[in-house]
Image (cartoon, helix red, strand yellow):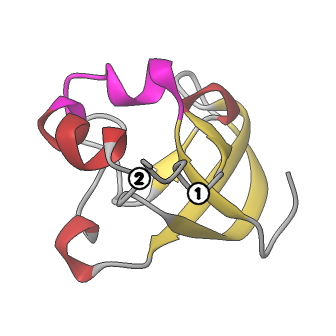
Amino acid sequence: MKIGDLVTLSQYGIGLEACWKYHRDWHQGKLVGLLIDIYDNNNAYFNGKKYKVLWIDQKYKGIKRIYWCQPGLFKRGDLKMFKAPKEKT
């Protein structure tokens, strides 16, 4: 992943306690964000890289990994590249 990519939550990410309420929108392909920053932070919880996501729809502006984290910060395993959902025929 690189800055500027469209991302969504992965299966693991949508299963996080703070994100589960968006499962229906995620399944419909509405939960899309723009990766705006990648940086390292070596504290006890976020050891490694942090990925900052700007969610495109303002409805999802406050999505957090865990309730005490800043909105939009995730680990790599919480995110995946966005693919548009297949159209039903």
User: Element type at marker 2?
Assistant: loop
Q: State the residue in front, 5 or 38.
A: 5
Say if 57 sits above or below 76 in the image. Answer: below
Can residue 29 be seen in this snapshot? Answer: yes
Q: Residue type at mark 1: give it.
A: Ala
Q: Is residue 65 magenta?
A: no
Say if 32 sits above or below 48 in the image. Answer: below
Q: Which mark is residue 36?
A: none
Say if 80 sits above or below 14 in the image. Answer: below
Residue at screen point 35% across, 60% down = 30
- The residue at which mark 1 appears reads as 84
Can residue 67 be seen in this snapshot? Answer: no
Q: State the residue in front, 29 or 18.
A: 29
- Name the spot of residue 1 as percent of width and height, x first: 85, 51
Residue 15 shown left or right of residue 3 in the figure: left
Q: Residue type at mark 2: give it.
A: Gly
Q: State the residue in front, 29 or 10.
A: 29
Residue at screen point 12% across, 37% down = 21
Say if 6 sits above or below 47 in the image. Answer: below
Q: Are marks 1 and 2 in contact (CB under 8 Å)?
A: yes
Which residue extends farthest right? 2
Residue 15 shown left or right of residue 18 in the figure: right
First to last magenta residue range: 10-20
- The residue at which mark 2 appears reads as 29
Q: Earlier in the sequence, mark 1 or mark 2?
A: 2
Residue at screen point 27% across, 71% down = 61
- Name the spot of residue 66 as percent of width and height, x first: 29, 34
